[in-house]
Amino acid sequence: MDRKLNNKLVYRLLLVMIMGLIITKVIHMESFATELVGNINKDREVSAIKASTNLSNWLIHGAGTLEDTEQGLKLTSELNENVMAISSVQSEDFIYEADIMVLDQSADTTLIFRSGKDGWDSYMVQLVPEAGLIRLRDARDENRLKEEVDVNIQEGEIYHLKVKVVGDNIKVYWENQYTPVIDSTVSLYHNGYLGLNVWNGSALFQNVKVSELVTNLGSTIVQEGNWEPNIRGLKGLTRENEIAKKVYKTQASDFVLEGNISFDDEQSKAGFTFRMNEDGTKGYQALLTKQGDELVAQLQKIDGTVLGKSTRNFKSQSGTKHHLEIIVNEEQITLYIDGYSDPAIEVADSSYTDGLTGLTVLSGKAYFQDVYLVPTNSYYKEKYRPDYHYTPARGSASDPNGLVYFEGEYHLFHQDGGKWAHAVSEDLIHWKHLPIALPWNDQGHIWSGSAVVDMDNDSGLFTNSNGKGMIAYYTSFNPDANNGNQRIGLAYSIDKGRTWKYSKEHPIVIENPGKSEEDPGGWDFRDPKVVRDEANDRWIMVVSGGDHIRFFTSQDLIQWEHTDNFGYGDYIRGGVWECPDLFELQIEGADEKKWVLMISSGGKSEYRGI
């Protein structure tokens, strides 16, 4: 009996030992597998295919994982740990944004920018759900930068977070608000990578986007040199003994190629390439060379053979968006610069008859934006495009603004998404397109208005530019404010309308008439029209006020005095009064003139908008 009992005990002990070894092995394998997965995720680049983003090659740092899903990039950290997902995209000035779903209330979720490779020497914009705030901070040391604002953040909800970075200024935007919730000036980091971060939990990042080139050239097939996204478009810059070159998939023989190129102050040379071979070693280059405050154009082969140079120089301020238009039809190649009606270059050459299209920077740096190629046989030949009346090449057109004549050119501005689009003509029939003249600014959207020529420098804005220039008055509309807090803003141009600047000293020349000590004003107050009253040596502005017109006068085009109203009560016909015009007419058969006021009236359904 004792022997049998001993055998049973031995068997049981052996069984326990074997089970223990198996359990230990399983635990070790699970631990090894977890460690292996983590290490693999840290050491490899994760490309986003399912999620919506224009960033690429995400490298993982810290304790956690990144998953590419249809719902977005799912970034998950271990308990009380950080995980960084740093893309290969670097930028200096940009807009960086994402839709973020907080999956754990305990998780802090972050946009990282101007970062080092591991994410720690960077700026962070964090959503902190448990504390209910947005935080802008220095990732390495929050004692150097920490700004916070209270918001309501709930688990499972989706929020839009955006950051705008220009120079030392950082603006943080929450949801769909136009006004930033944080506006900070700080100089810790100047360039770097873009990325994501999560601490202590999980979050989904979708529509992760940075500023990009707007173009129809398709995908890139060859890229050399340094390229990075920028708030001004796609930035290309050269290094020592290295040019910047991009070749796109689009191929064409006869076409119209147009786009905008801008430069900083330094000497630079950049432009478009076309009719290229696949590696970009043969074809044509249309180049703009900036030297000081002037610019010249040159057409050459990629091997350096010069085919033509512009016979005139073009003015070039820092940041001016130069519009380059290339028309290629069989052997004929024609270049137009900045909307001027005379070609900058016209040559005939048959060395290359077909090929790919691209961008190049041969020296310095340049910014490219709104680059489009359209085959000649379809350019402005859409079925329903008017043949006679003005139409933009793309975008929308409403509310003509700032119709003015200056030094041999008619200027046409019009509304395009709350911005002023721009075109010029010498005969009012044939129009050349220019870049957006007045984009959105910190004050708001740029609604309708008018433009005048200040021939005698009444404003004092043109002392250093031959004593004359153009001034635009527009309706500033802030989407966050009551009824847009409609006000009258000012912009001006010293280079025949090619570059427009918002006045820093006088961004708003007339406040909303409903303004009080605590209320910025929400009255209808828009569509300023400014005209010259020679008989009284003054300027007159008329502004629509919903159910009346307000009159203002000025001697210097900057300081405006409210002098009179017209309307109210019995004058109302059909609804809101908008877009007033004021002009003088000679009375037929008499030595007398009369002022004529015209308005647009509509907006009430019972009048069918009439």
Image: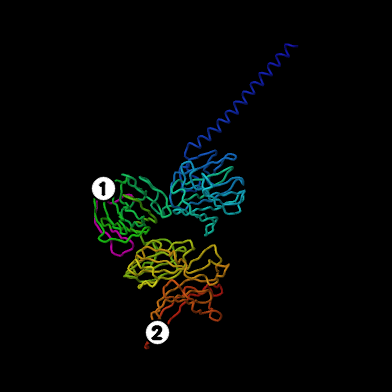
Please identify the quarter of the rendering in which residue 176 is found.
bottom right
Residue 95 at x, y percent in the picture? 47, 53
Near mark 2 (Cα within 10 A), the count class, few <14, some 14-19 or many ≥20, is: few
Q: Is residue 83 visible?
A: yes
Q: Is residue 389 visible?
A: no
Q: Secondary structure at mark 1?
A: loop
Residue 474 at x, y percent in the picture? 45, 68
> Magenta stretch containing residue 205, yes or no?
no
Give the residue at mark 2.
593
In this rendered view, identify the residue nearer to me: 305 or 488. Answer: 488
In which quadrant will I find the N terminus?
A: top right
**Marker disc for residue 303:** 1
> Magenta stretch containing residue 338, yes or no?
yes
Left or right: 108 in relation to 540? right
Specify the amino acid type for callout 2: Lys
C-alpha span from label 1 to label 2: 65 Å
Left or right: 117 in relation to 242? right
* Front of the two marks 1 and 2: 2
Span shown in magenta: 334-357
Near mark 1 (Cα within 10 A), the count class, few <14, some 14-19 or many ≥20, is: few
Where is 398 relative to 107, above or below? below
In this rendered view, identify the residue nearer to me: 606 or 30. Answer: 30
Please identify the quarter of the rendering in which residue 63 is found.
top right
Q: Secondary structure at mark 2?
A: strand
Specify the amino acid type for callout 1: Asp
In this rendered view, identify the residue nearer to me: 572 or 135. Answer: 135
Where is 255 relative to 387, above or below? above
